[in-house]
Each structure stands twice: as C-alpha cells, then as structure tokens.
Image: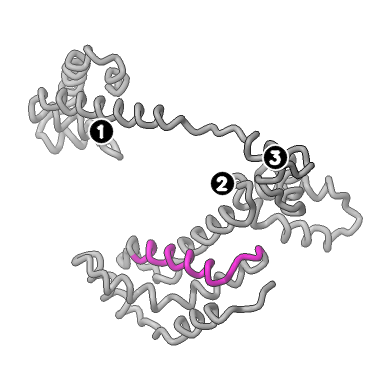
Amino acid sequence: MNHYSAEDHRIASAAMAAPYLTREQETALATRWREREDNKARNDIAMAHLRLVVAMASKFKGFGLPKSDLVQEGYLGLLEAAARFDHERGVRFSTYASWWIRAAMQDFVLRNWSIVRGGTSSAQKALFFKLRRLRAQIAARDRSMSAQAIYVEIASRLGVHVNDVQAMDARLSGNDTSLQAPLGGDGEEDGAQRMDMIVCDAPLPEEQVTGIIDGERISQKLRSALAKLSPRESRVIKARKLAEKAATLAELGDELGISKERVRQIEGRALEKLKAAMTADPQANALVPA
C-alpha cells in the first residue's frame, strides 16, 4: 500500500514551495540562531530543506508506514540538525542534516515496524535496513549460492554474527503476533494472553524512585565535600575528574602558573579531602575517583 494520502500531497506541496537558500542566506540564518537563539531563523533553515525530508521518506516506503508519519519524524530530525548546525565547519546544511533526518526515520521504523523491537546497535540497524537489498544483490550475482552461504557473506559485510543475519531474516519474513492473543488459542475470555508471559527487565517503580533519591543524596554529599576544598583544589578536581573532557596536568599548570608536579600534588591532596568528607556515606565514596 504505497498510494499517497491527501496529507502526503499537502506536505509535498509545502516542501516544493519552500525557497532554496543560497550559502550566504544559510550562513546568515545559522548565525542568527547560534548567536541570538532566533527560533525563526532555525525554522527558516528547516523549512527550506523540507523537500529533503520528503525525498528521504520515499526511501522507507517499503516498510508500509504512512509517509506523513515518516515526514513528521524526519522533520524532527531536521529541526535537531538546524539547532546543532555550525556553518563555520564549511559544510552545507543539507549534507549535515541528512544524517539527522535518516537517523530519526530509522528509529521511527524500528519502533513501529514490528510489535517486538529488534536490536538498536549500529550494526543491528544496518542489518535491519540493508539485509533484503544485500540478499537480492548476492542472489542475483550468483543464483547457485545457498541461503546459508548468502547469510555468511552478509554477516561478513556488515560485521555481525551469521546467527544475527538468520534471526533478522526470519523476523523480516514473518508476521507479527498479537500480544493479546490467548496462549491456549481456545478463545476463552479468562485465559492467559501472550503479554502475561513477557518478563520486564526494567526496575520496579519503587526501585526507580529509590535510585533517584539515592542519586540526589549522593550528589548533595559530593557538592558539600567540594565546598570544603580551596579554590585551587576545586578547580583542579573539576577540570581533572568532573569535566566531560579531562584537562591535562600541563594545561592546568599553564592556567594556574605552576608546574605539572605541583598540580599532581594538589590533585592528590584534594582527593584525600573528598574521601575524608564522604566517609560517612559508603555509596558516595564510590563516586570519588581513585
């Protein structure tokens, strides 16, 4: 069922009506967004590239999902790309945005194509979206190859285990089973359903709340311990242990006007202070880097 709905035609018309942007216009809009958080500038960049979303949605029509839904998900990816785009890297927005649009649509397909969701690693995603095409290519090249040999070649190309290829092929070839279907198949209203047999690996609600509260307590304990450090000690710990990208001893030495060895001594002394301050909370101690 690949016919287009009235909504699909409306979206396509809006996409084609959006004007193209020159590199200069694109740069000006990106600058307004980054420097002033001008939402209109971000939206203008996105709308000018809506045709890219519509075109990419057509590539996913084989999964039987409404094109309008794919376009909507792709547009969310487009907005994310517009928010993150840095024109100073010398890349046109369309090139940058394509990755975000494709990723958003792939996630949507994986969430909705089947009741039971498959693997979400990059390798599993590649297997899901490329399996049928690769299988057809290999079979067309050598019609004498067995199914097992084809599986082996696909596994080699995508860097996955051959068992994963077989399992994914079976999943793509089979039909979904309703989770509300009775286990016994006798249609009894009070019978158990398939969903009753599914084991949930997620923490129980009370466990989730406990984890949140414990995390907040530990964070508060750590903040209190950090407050007991001197300004220089606090700077070293935050830069060396708490920053997303740890600073080197040399970088901190240059910043503070001291030697690398002196920075190392300050770091060691600060860690000892933190451990002493958090001794009363064994869980918090685990957060202090050794």
Residue type (three-letter) at the residue carrying disc 3: His
Vertical order, 192 against 83 (above or below): above
Q: CA distance from mark 2 to mark 3?
A: 15 Å
> Looking at the rendered structure, which numbered label has been put on residue 242?
1
Vertical order, 218 against 3 (above or below): above
Residue ID at (83%, 63%): 140
Q: Which residue is mark 3?
A: 161
The color scheme shown is one colour
* Residue 215 among magenta residues: no
Q: Are marks 2 and 3 in contact (CB under 8 Å)?
A: no
Quadrant that contains the C terminus: top left
Q: Which residue is mark 2?
A: 120
Residue ID at (46%, 81%): 15
Vertical order, 190 against 283 (above or below): below
Residue 27 image position (x, y, % from top left): 29, 74
Q: Secondary structure at mark 2?
A: loop
Residue type (three-letter) at the residue carrying disc 2: Thr
Sequence order check, earlier mark of 2 and 1: 2
Residue ID at (42%, 64%): 76
Q: Secondary structure at mark 1?
A: helix
Residue 108 image position (x, y, % from top left): 54, 58
In the rendered structure, the answer to whether residue 137 lies left or right of residue 259 reads right
Sequence order check, earlier mark of 1 and 3: 3
* Quadrant of residue 190 within the rendered picture: top right
Residue situated furthest front in the rendering: 189
Residue type (three-letter) at the residue carrying disc 1: Leu
Quadrant that contains the N terminus: bottom right
